[in-house]
Image (spheres, rainbow, N blue to C red):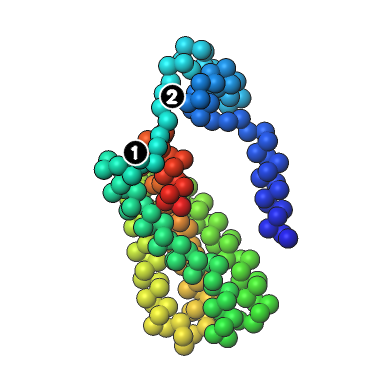
Amino acid sequence: GLAAVPALLVLIGRQGLPESPRWLLARGRVDDARAAFAAFGIEADAAVASTMSRRTGSYGELFSAGYIRRLVLVSLVFTLNCFSGSISTVAAPLVLNTVGALSTNASLFFSATIWITALLGVTTSAFLIDRIGRRKLCYLSVIPYGIIALLMAVYAQRSPTFLVIGFYALSYATWLGIAVLVWVWSSELFPTHLRGRSQGVCN
């Protein structure tokens, strides 16, 4: 039931957002596009609006030779991230409870606090992404994640403390880079008219 609360807030908040001007222009709704620009605080007269790209994409173009390689690569990274991200956040309380490292109540508390670590990772990512670039941020995320995972494989079974700390570290490493970058890559690596489709396919 609690999951319905943020969904409701998003639904309410969405009512105040105008459609994308590019989406409106692609459908020939120039006046609506100008109104949308105005809502965003951007002045755009009819001449500017009418000359913007109205090109619409297609799945055929997305899967063409020009984009298929990056589409497969980003989809693969997205898929792998679903495993690593789930292990370090969603599945972690179950693991900790199953191996006896934490009680049920403690596992639930961990489940709540692990997302604070994730938020710290995202905040750090937001600070670094344009300063050091996407690739360096990726390395800064996945290399420590791999090292931590290997250390946990060796030591965590004998040390509940190391196991718990390791999960926090995995969460931070995941959300520091790769968990954010999959969303960035699935849009930035494709032209604007294909981004909606690329996001959908990669996700």
Q: Residue at x 56, y 79 (%)?
A: 96
The residue lying at 57 percent from left, 83 percent from top is 98
Q: Is residue 169 visible?
A: no
Is residue 104 shown above or below 140? below
Please identify the quadrant where the N terminus is shown: bottom right
Say which residue label 1 marks: 61
Closer to the camera, 53 or 130? 53
**Residue contact between numbered discs 2 and 1, judged by CB atoms under 8 Å:** no
Residue 38 image offset from top left, x and y in percent: 59, 21
Q: Amino acid at mark 1?
A: Glu
Three-letter amino acid code at disc 2?
Answer: Arg
Viewer-side residue, 14 vs 107: 14
Q: Which is nearer the N-term, disc 2 or disc 1?
A: 2
**Which one is in front in this view, the residue at disc 2 or the one at disc 1?**
1
Crowding at mark 2 (Cα within 10 Å: few <14, some 14-19, many 20+): some
- Residue 23 image point, x, y percent: 51, 29
Identify residue for label 2: 54
Left or right: 58 as drawn, with respect to 2: left
